[in-house]
Image: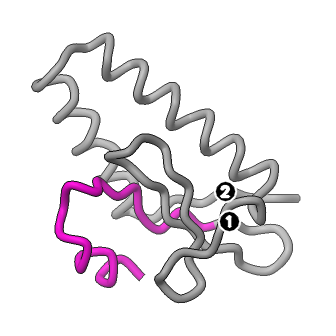
Amino acid sequence: MKQLTFSKKSIADIRKISEYIEVKFSLRIKSVFLEKLRKNFDYIFSSPESFPLSEYENLRKCVVTKQTSIFYKIEGIDKIYIVSVFDTRQNQNKINKTK
């Protein structure tokens, strides 16, 4: 059975980004973002190899918005590990610390 697993960092990333959106924009925009994020997790789950490999070794990249990307890796035939939900406004070197 296929399994989608989240790192502690990815959960913290989602929380941090959604709180930022709520403060800077609105609760409605936050809800729209979270729904878009959920749909992308569904896409990753159903077809994990459809997203391209990123510039980071063994990590695939799913662009959610122009400010947010999901980095994940496929482990074996049935496990997908969400490494980070990355806010692209951050320093790009931080992604290396998520592996």
Q: Which residue is mark 1?
A: 80
The residue that appears at 24% across and 80% down in the rendered structure is 93
Work out whether 21 lies above or below 94.
above
Let me know if residue 43 is in the magenta part.
no
Q: Give SS at disc 1.
A: strand
Q: Which is nearer the N-term, disc 1 or disc 2?
A: 2
| Mark 1 and mark 2: Cα distance apart in space | 5 Å
The range drawn in magenta is 81-99
Q: In the image, what residue type sits under mark 2?
A: Leu
The residue that appears at 69% across and 52% down in the rendered structure is 44
The residue that appears at 82% across and 59% down in the rendered structure is 2
The residue that appears at 76% across and 59% down in the rendered structure is 50
Residue 67: % across, % down: 32, 46
Q: Please identify the residue farthest to the top as the structure is shown.
A: 28
Which label number is shown at residue 4?
Answer: 2
**How many numbered dots are placed on residues in this image?**
2
Let me know if residue 85 is in the magenta part.
yes
Question: Left or right: where does residue 74 sit relative to residue 73?
Answer: right
Which label number is shown at residue 60?
Answer: none
CB of mark 1 within 8 Å of CB of mark 2? yes
Residue 85: % across, % down: 40, 55
Q: In the image, what residue type sits under mark 1?
A: Ile
Indicate the quadrant containing the N terminus: top left, top right, bottom left or bottom right. Answer: bottom right
Residue 82: % across, % down: 53, 62
